[in-house]
């Protein structure tokens, strides 16, 4: 097997990228098992070292920096779990169920290894003079073991094993259930009249979706590029209701994909884990390693945002209701499946702009050029597609990234469109992190962005909405955090930062989406080549804050829900649907339906890394608005400002406290003022 399994030898591809073209499903399991065995061997080598424990023989794996060292378990895990999200199948789902408990057990075997922890503690208590980065690594390593139960007694360790193993399996089951429910539903339309209101681009996409399924007529799915426009444009109210209820009742039905009890159990497992480790709640445990530091600060942020935005949000909502009544009559009662439709009508009335007007100017290949061009203008880096780098699906493009001096910087994968085996949403990940070995070789990263953007049709290329361009910019911002990583240790490089800091580079990039000077570089009509008219851009900018207060409250409501679950001190037995509606009510201004439920599809806080951390998006929004205000003042394309942002934040990863890095960039701590001014909630001081 070792002769034919690509995981068992170093990759011979360009930049030692993953040989996706050679990897088969049957290669994963033996690689996992051998990887665990090798990992155990390395741990034993460390703990059985007769030399006294030092930073260099304990905190740094003595083999890790050797040129010939190959971390099999890390490589196979990275590839498998990335593909499990981006290109899965039934066989992979089954294998994940089989491997998850073994991997969780192995992780526990490492973090609960008493001999290993005693060596780490000895170094922590008495070590040579360390560089700041070495000190950060030591603290992270020591705290990681403590927070994983290393100081528990044997009974406590056994209980922690049980909790983490069950939570790992349930998180996996949650994600599998959600993917299954999402892909199982289609709205099959056979009457052309039911397409009334839909623009041509959406009709063509629905026609293509039907052809993919060998169906006549048109198909609407729950994937964002299909669902969102239908809710916005479709005149058929009953079909909007059907689609809305399908989307918002996912994983609540009486079938094998129901996530209600899984969510309840996950909340309790995490609460018990935190209390086992000496914390009152899981949120207390999580926030110990966050910029927010404690629950009170999170609630202060969320409540301050409610206070600032809710009055405007109520006005926005009433305006939409009034528009609906003007169109339908005074007796019309707006329902949740009506909000997007009538909000769009009001947007047209007020600003004469919508996403369909912009689509012809936002052709994907040109957007790619624009986004890459933005990075080149800011940082001097360039992207060159390399078709010799293997990819895992034809939709994926692989690029080499070169620094401004022409030196190789990174590999960048971009995966653009929805498909059967792909989770919804968008994310950035890595296939290889960045680090510097003992010989000074700078191992460069392989980063990837995965999205679900509008697909091309038989008649048209992929034409995006502005929201999709913002999504691209967001994930691209994360990728720059990885691409520019320049730290000694992989566990501190790139996006390995505190969770409420990680969204700063991504949300910062979104700011450029409404800058005329940026749009003018790529927004050309896909048929005529004419640039997006200045008059259209002006209308777009004028309406940039349309319904922004409602959008803010939506994010705040998710943060409130997250905190409500993870500030539980006692066993959680409440009805999930009722609990949800009570938890976020202060940020809700619309009607709540009894049968709908967000929790059961809220991957971020149930199966992702945002448990007790969803507030991070709003926390980082304060940072990104504050940071972009610096660019607005000094010039949005000012290379000196961009270089400072790269040097102070993007390249530093988690080597220093996030606030230290931010203050080094700006010269001061951030305030909420820039965000309020950007959203026209507060006027800038004259």
Image (cartoon, grey):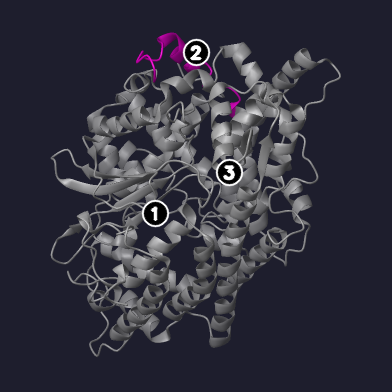
Q: Residue furthest right?
A: 331
**What is the spatial separation of the Cα atoms under label 2 and label 1, in whole angstroms?**
38 Å
Task: Specify which label sits upstream in the sequence, 1 or 3.
Answer: 3
Where does residue 250 sit, x and y in percent of width and height?
69, 49
Decide which of 435, 453 is in the foreground and name it. Answer: 453
Q: Secondary structure at mark 3?
A: loop
Q: Which residue is mark 1?
A: 497
Where does residue 504 sit, x and y in percent of width and height?
42, 42
Q: Is residue 567 visible?
A: yes
Q: Which residue is mark 2?
A: 539
At 43% from the left and 23% from the top, the residue drawn is: 514
| Res. 347 image quadrant | top right
Between label 2 and label 3, give the one nearer the viewer: 3
Circle 2 crowding by C-alpha within 10 Å: few under 14, some 14–19, many from 20: some
Q: Secondary structure at mark 1?
A: loop
**What is the spatial separation of the Cα atoms under label 2 and label 3, in whole angstroms?**
39 Å
Circle 1 crowding by C-alpha within 10 Å: few under 14, some 14–19, many from 20: many
Q: Is residue 545 visible?
A: no
Q: Which mark is residue 415?
A: none
Q: Which residue is mark 3?
A: 213
Q: Is residue 381 above or below residue 461?
A: below
Task: Specify which label sits upstream in the sequence, 2 or 3.
Answer: 3
Where does residue 530 sit, x and y in percent of width and height?
36, 13
Q: Is residue 542 magenta?
A: yes
Q: Is residue 336 magenta?
A: no
Q: Quadrant of the N terminus?
A: bottom left
Q: Is residue 499 above or below residue 238?
A: below
Q: Is residue 183 above or below residue 317?
A: below
Q: Quadrant of the C terminus?
A: top left
- Left or right of residue 254, residue 521 in this image: left
Decide which of 106, 285 is in the foreground and name it. Answer: 106
Decide which of 362, 405 is in the foreground and name it. Answer: 362
């Amino acid at each position: 097997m070792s002769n034919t399994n690509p995981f068992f030898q170093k990759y011979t591809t360009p930049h030692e990228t993953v040989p996706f073209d050679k990897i088969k499903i049957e290669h994963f399991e033996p690689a996992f098992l051998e990887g665990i065995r090798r990992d155990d061997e390395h741990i034993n080598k460390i703990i059985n070292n007769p030399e006294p424990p030092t930073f260099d023989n304990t905190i740094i794996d003595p083999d890790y920096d050797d040129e010939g060292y190959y971390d099999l378990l890390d490589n196979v895990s990275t590839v498998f779990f990335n593909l499990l999200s981006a290109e899965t199948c039934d066989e992979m789902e089954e294998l994940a169920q089989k491997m998850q408990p073994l991997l969780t057990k192995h992780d526990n075997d490492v973090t609960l290894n008493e001999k290993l922890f005693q060596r780490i503690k000895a170094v922590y208590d008495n070590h040579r003079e360390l560089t700041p980065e070495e000190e950060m690594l030591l603290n992270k390593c020591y705290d990681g073991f403590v927070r994983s139960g290393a100081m528990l007694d044997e009974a406590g360790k056994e209980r922690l094993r049980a909790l983490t193993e069950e939570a790992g399996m349930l998180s996996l089951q949650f994600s599998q259930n959600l993917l299954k429910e999402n892909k199982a539903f289609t709205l099959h339309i056979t009457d052309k009249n039911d397409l009334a209101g839909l623009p041509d681009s959406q009709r063509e996409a629905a026609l293509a979706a039907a052809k993919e399924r060998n169906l006549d007529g048109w198909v609407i799915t729950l994937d964002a590029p299909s669902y969102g426009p239908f809710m916005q444009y479709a005149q058929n109210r009953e079909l909007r209701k059907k689609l809305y209820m399908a989307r918002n009742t996912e994983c609540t039905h009486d079938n094998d994909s129901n996530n209600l009890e899984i969510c309840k159990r996950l909340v309790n497992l995490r609460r018990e884990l935190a209390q086992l480790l000496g914390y009152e709640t899981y949120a207390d445990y999580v926030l110990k390693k966050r910029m927010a530091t404690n629950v009170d600060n999170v609630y202060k942020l969320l409540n301050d945002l409610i206070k600032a935005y809710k009055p405007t949000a109520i006005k926005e909502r009433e305006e939409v209701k009034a528009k609906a009544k003007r169109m339908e009559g005074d007796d019309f009662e707006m329902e949740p499946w009506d909000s997007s439709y009538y909000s769009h009508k009001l947007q047209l009335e007020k600003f004469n702009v919508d996403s369909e007007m912009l689509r012809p100017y936002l052709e994907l290949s040109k957007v790619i050029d624009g986004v890459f061009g933005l990075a080149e203008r800011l940082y001097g880096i360039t992207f060159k597609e390399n078709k010799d780098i293997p990819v895992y699906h034809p939709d994926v493009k692989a690029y080499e990234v070169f620094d401004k001096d022409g030196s190789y910087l990174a590999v960048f994968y971009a995966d653009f469109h929805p498909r059967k085996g792909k989770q919804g949403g968008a994310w950035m990940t890595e296939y290889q992190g960045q680090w510097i070995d003992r010989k000074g070789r700078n191992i460069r990263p392989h980063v990837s962005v995965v999205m679900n953007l509008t697909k091309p049709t038989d008649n048209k290329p992929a034409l995006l909405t502005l929201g999709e361009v913002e999504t691209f910019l967001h994930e691209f911002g994360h990728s720059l955090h990885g691409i520019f990583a320049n730290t000694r240790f992989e566990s501190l490089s790139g996006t390995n930062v505190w969770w409420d800091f990680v969204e700063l580079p991504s949300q910062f990039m979104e700011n450029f989406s409404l800058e005329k000077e940026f749009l003018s570089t790529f927004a050309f009509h896909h048929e005529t080549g004419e640039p997006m008219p200045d008059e259209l851009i002006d209308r777009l900018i004028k309406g940039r804050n349309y319904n922004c207060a409602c959008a803010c409250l939506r994010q705040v409501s998710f943060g409130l829900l997250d905190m409500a679950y993870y500030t539980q001190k006692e066993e959680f037995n409440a009805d999930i649907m009722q609990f949800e509606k009570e938890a976020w009510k202060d940020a809700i201004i619309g009607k709540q339906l009894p049968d709908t439920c967000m929790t059961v599809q809220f991957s971020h806080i149930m199966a992702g890394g945002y448990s007790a951390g969803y507030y991070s998006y709003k926390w980082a929004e304060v940072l990104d608005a504050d940071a972009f205000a610096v660019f607005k003042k000094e010039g949005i394309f000012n290379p000196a400002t961009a270089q400072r942002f790269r040097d102070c934040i993007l390249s530093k990863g988690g080597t220093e406290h996030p606030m230290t890095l931010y203050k080094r960039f700006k010269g001061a701590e951030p305030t909420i003022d820039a965000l309020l001014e950007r959203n026209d909630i507060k006027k800038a001081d004259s």
